[in-house]
Image (cartoon, helix red, strand yellow):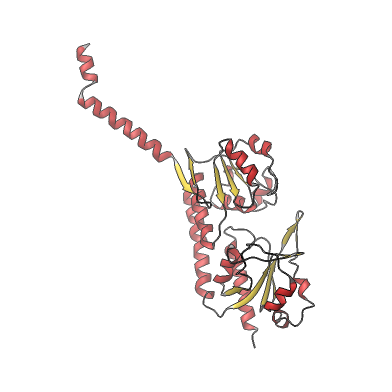
Amino acid sequence: MALLCTATHSPATQAATHAATHAATQAATQAAITVRDDAGLTVTLAKPAQRVIAMAPHITELLFAAGGGERVVGGMNFSDYPAAAKRLPLVGSNEQIDLERVLALKPDLLVVWKGGNSSRQIEQLKSLGLPIYYSAPAKLDEIATSLIRLGQLLGTEPAAQAAARDYRQKIAALGAKYAQRPPVRLFYQIWDKPLYTLNDEHIVSDAIRLCGGRNVFGMLKVMAPSVGAEAVVQENPEAIVGGERHEGDSPTDSGLAIWRPYKGMLALQRGNLFELSGDLMARATPRMADGTAQLCEKLELARRRRP
């Protein structure tokens, strides 16, 4: 017995035990995944998420692009891209979340829209111990960053890295081609009744700058301000740009027809009323590279129409 006790507590045995414990602790630490979200908060998961709910259409798209489509178990209304997203169970809208349905899906990660979802309901879900990642890319490059971070949380980092690299290459090519072109002053219209635009803090204005554009209402303090038609006429932009919107479940036109009577405006005189397709600019996803390419082409057309 004495010999056994001596062997059990020998320096060699103690060293081996310590090494094994350290290795186990290190492995556990390495298994944990920690990233910072768009709210600047730290999100830590013990292992890659297996059941994720996307709380906005752009989030659904980001998760699929990051290689995690099979892990997404729920989404919000208008989650229609890629096609597989249309089959997701819906858990509400940005205005109202069905908390019971969220809990029934047993998520191990919620990716929510910072500033877009009901903060009160998100706090309720957070109080239940559900891990929450806030998504709100504010610059074009932050889309790539989002892909990588989400890929880490999902355990799909190689696919996410590849998607981010492809997206960054497209954005870099557009910047090299258009960023130094002569500036085009434009009004960017997101809604017509009432008339809404975006300021320079919004990611769309980052795309406008990349294309060599100047947002005539970029200096306003509110991110999505309402403006009057008279204010637009006074600014006299060289181009007016709008995109299709969702009204109900169907896309509608851009509402640019409201400017037809204002024939004295520079944008009307030169035929520079430009419509962008679908959700390419409305959602902070990799498809925004395609929307930005469309925008750059429209502004280049405006330059060619100069006398």
Image quadrant where residue 105 sits: top right
Tell me if residue 90 can be seen.
no
Q: Looking at the image, which residue sits at the far bottom?
A: 307
Foreground pick, 223 / 213 = 223
Q: Position of residue 136 (x, y in %)?
A: 57, 55
Q: Image check: 61 left or right of 156? A: right
Label tally: 0
Percent position of residue 243, x then y: 69, 66
Q: Residue at x 76, y 53 (%)?
A: 249
Q: Residue furthest right?
A: 261
Quadrant for the N terminus, please. Answer: top left
Q: Nearer the viewer, residue 65 or 97?
A: 97
Q: What residue do we see at 21% from left, 22% from top? A: 10
Q: Tell me the quarter of the image containing the C terminus.
A: bottom right
Residue reaching furthest to the top: 1
> Measured from the top left, where is residue 145 in percent x and y?
49, 56
What is the x, y in percent for residue 255? 76, 67
Camera-side residue: 220 or 78? Answer: 220
Q: Is residue 51 placed above or below 160 in the rendered structure?
A: above
Q: Is residue 287 visible?
A: yes
- Left-right relation of 40 to 184: left
